[in-house]
Image (cartoon, grey):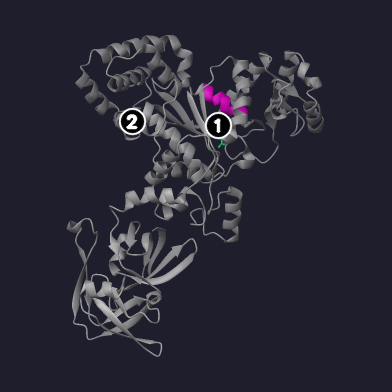
Amino acid sequence: MAGEDPKELLFLCALQNAVRHGGVPQAGAVIGMVMGAHPELRSRAKEVSALAKEAIADVAALSPEARVTTLQERAPGMFAALSEKHEHKKVLPDLEGSQNGVVMRFAPNPSGPLHIGHARAAALNDAYVKQCGGRYILRIEDTDPKRVDPEAYETVKEDIRWLGLGITDIVTQSERLPIYYDLCRQLIERDGAYVCTCDNEHFKELKQAKTACPCRDQPVEKNLELWQKMLDHGFHEGEVSVRIKTDLDNPDPAMRDFPAFRILDAPPHPKVKAHVYPLMNFSVVADDHLLGVTHVIRGKDHIANTRRQRYIYDHMGWKIPVYRHYGRMGIEGVVLSTSQMRLGINEGTYTGWDDIHLGTLRALARRGISPEAVKNAMLAIGIGDTDISFSWDNLYAENRKIVDPTANRYFFVPDPVEVKIEGAPDHTAHALLHPGDAARGSRIMEFTGQVLLPKGELVPGTSMVRLKDLFNVKIAWDGGIPLFSYGGESLADARAAKAHIIQWLPAQATVPCTLLTQEGEMKGACEPAVKSELGKVVQFERVGFVKIDAVDASGVKAYFTHK
Ligand code: GLU
């Protein structure tokens, strides 16, 4: 959104709303959206409300055409968001209360790069914001210094840029500690929380027995005093916590008076000097409320947290967002645990966060999976609450739709052997760069007698192979030694002999190529023109799509993407 001037914000919001819905919006909808994204304006509600009326009048004065061009000029991002709406239109089911736009958030912990598991929340929330219009907040949840990797602040943002999320606001929780402290005081004043100095084990026993601990009935003044003492370094780690008053009879012991704040003496936080930290349930509620989050889409593993969080909303008298909890998603075949990844990198088992054995987004990128494919695969999985296992094949199918039309085709000969073909005339092969797009041109390969062939195709007993885009080759076996000779150009002969159509390279024009797969590496050779495809996905014919990762004097290094 251009600028931070409230009048401008209100005008653009009203304008976008008018272009989307074809009429002039209600003041409430516009104010709600602007305040949601800019909570600092809440204290100026009167002024904002007056400005909203002016902004709406300004929009009403414009013709429908002028509204479109004004939005296009003054807020191209907001204009683009309107057409993106159609892109995913029917993909996701409607969310209640989303008619006037939504404010949603993606809230990762900065403990390492994002992985495929994060991509579901990231993509679903993103798609809803695009579908309904509104704001998409990236909230970095870094209030547990034990789980913060200082580098992850940047890596998470890079991963989000790669995914292409329509983030409109970025919020870092460690910068908001005073806000949480102030809300905690308010919650204590409302008698919704108390400062508990019980020994942890003792508290657990009482909790199991549905019995209140002695601190629970302290007067508010005493709680406020103890809270101040916490902030003033009057306690050490483990001696005290702030607990939310819930229902001690709740059948689930985990709901009973759960903690909201604690003290950590160590480790130091990389961004702020602090010792009193909110626990996730508190900071999540505080920010969902203050940032005006209307809808929360997260995994079923958060259902218990949602139940806990409701207690805080109730104590504070706040409106609860709309929640959706999607089912669990088992992901096999890659490492996802941050600690396991870090350990493996430190021990040299993995080359880095983008090692292709890992499930990080950067590993997928390295293998040639496009961000659109990741998002589309996640939207196809959707928000259903059934537990599923993630299908790599579906992700690959989405990726294939994207790379197949663009990837140039080349020959790669795995485990090559150089052979001489007797009796063949010199020949120039023209192989299309793309079979569906002749206009892209051809690769020209000069056959002058010697070729590289894949060893795996030369199984004893094979009598004929067809070199793709060239001609047939007869093979005679002399005591286990193959002898190669020209077999003519007839495709019918090749078919009759059930000849495999194989890749080949003119021996005089090849480049060494190492193809890395999750199972191991394959040494081979490829066409020299592959060197010009650095960073791109190409198809090695009959092998699969590969991403050209590195090119140097020693040759080409490529990662296998998928068939
Ligand atoms: N930071 C939390 C997590 O990554 C998300 C919190 C939430 O969705 O409410 O699990």
Disc 2: CA contacts within 10 A as few (<14), some (14-19) or many (>=20): some
Disc 1: CA contacts within 10 A as few (<14), some (14-19) or many (>=20): some
Q: Is residue 366 visible?
A: yes
Is residue 179 depicted above or below 120 in this figure? above
**Mark 1, mark 2: which one is toward the viewer?**
2
Residue 72 in the image: x percent, y percent?
25, 28
Question: Which residue is depicted at the point 58% across and 48% down?
Answer: 338
Q: Is residue 37 magenta?
A: no
Residue 100 in the image: x percent, y percent?
38, 20
Q: Could you say which quadrant of the image residue 415 lies in?
A: bottom left
Question: Which residue is depicted at the point 33% across and 30% down?
Answer: 85
Instruction: Name the one closer to the observer, 328 or 168.
Output: 328
Mark 1–mark 2 CB contact (< 8 Å)? no
* Amino acid type assigned to the residue bearing label 1 in the image: Gln
Mark found first going from the N terminus, 1 or 2: 2
Using the image, tell me which numbered label, if any, was put on residue 173: 1
Q: Could you say which quadrant of the image residue 377 lies in?
A: top left
Task: Residue at the far left: name it.
Answer: 439
Question: Which residue is depicted at the point 27% across and 22% down?
Answer: 19
Magenta region, residue range: 281-289
Q: Is residue 114 visible?
A: no
| Quarter placement of the N terminus | top left
